[in-house]
Amino acid sequence: MLKYLEKLSTNSYLQRKNRMDFTLILVVLTLFTGLFSLVKINKPIISQISEFSSSIFPVLFVVLLIRSFFIEPYKIPSGSMIPTLMIGDFILVDKNIYGYKLPLTNYTLIKNETPKRGDVIVFKYPENKNINYIKRVIGIPGDLIIYKDKTLFVNGNRYNQIKISHNFDPVEIANGTVSYEQNEFKDYLILNQNESTFNFKYKVPPKSYFVLGDNRDNSNDSRFWGPVPEENLVGKAFYIWMFWNFDSYYNFFDRVGNYIE
């Protein structure tokens, strides 16, 4: 497992709060209201609870269904994915693209696609599955990754970087350089700082994925704790639907409506 010895200033969690707590509450409430909606006892209090349960059960069931199998919202609280994602972005994640999973578990009911190089994925942090992380897939099973002088080589193919002029917040970009990195599937933005970095060579093991933050010099990623196991995959981030950060250089309309490349 790769270990990066320098201390990075930016964490890479999606949020500190355990999302499973909310999912568990949603599951329990859905079951509770579903059962009480079936109760037919001619007593005022029980009858009122039954009527209320009957009205709210369909809503809870639909929300649970959508969150568990289709789309789930997340908030970005850290800068590890700058310049692709900013602190305060609210994103949508496709939950079924990599397979349908049983709620509250990592068990895959139906397999679907596998992640591609360049996908921005949400996954359960390998060292604490109660925390969700978001990173970009750099290597898939069997890939040989070489990182040299801030340039990626995957299976011998160099990922070219094209520097761009930009209007990103100078505080968040600091003294870094924003570039488009090109792999075989897509072009996406990355941020490199002028400070020196370390080089490494790594081969991705079976059923796992090597991930990096787009903020290359400020990201807690596979360089620290190794690859992401296949069973830890949650979904693919694809859309920014909301932005909320009063301290940011950006406003609502700068961010909302952008697709995540």
Image (cartoon, rainbow, N blue to C red):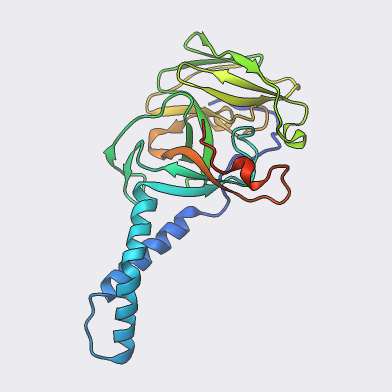
Q: Is residue 101 left or right of residue 119?
A: left
- Would you say residue 125 is visible in this rendering? no
Q: Toward which corner of the image does residue 235 lie, by quadrant?
A: top left
Q: How many marks?
A: 0
Please, which residue is most extreme toward the front here?
253
Does the rendering let one see residue 93? yes
In the displayed structure image, the side of residue 129 where residue 5 appears, left or right? right
In this view, the residue in front, 249 or 134, is 249
Q: Is residue 164 left or right of residue 59?
A: right
Q: Quadrant of residue 216?
A: top right
State whether residue 19 is above or below residue 136.
below
Residue 103 position within the rendered picture, expressed as x and y whole percent measured from the top left: 35, 52
The residue shown at (48%, 29%) is 227
Q: Position of residue 25 (x, y in %)?
A: 42, 63
In the image, residue 168 lies at what x, y percent?
70, 33
Image position, residue 244 (x, y; %): 63, 51
Picture quadrant where residue 172 is located: top right
As drawn, the residue found furthest toward the top would be 156
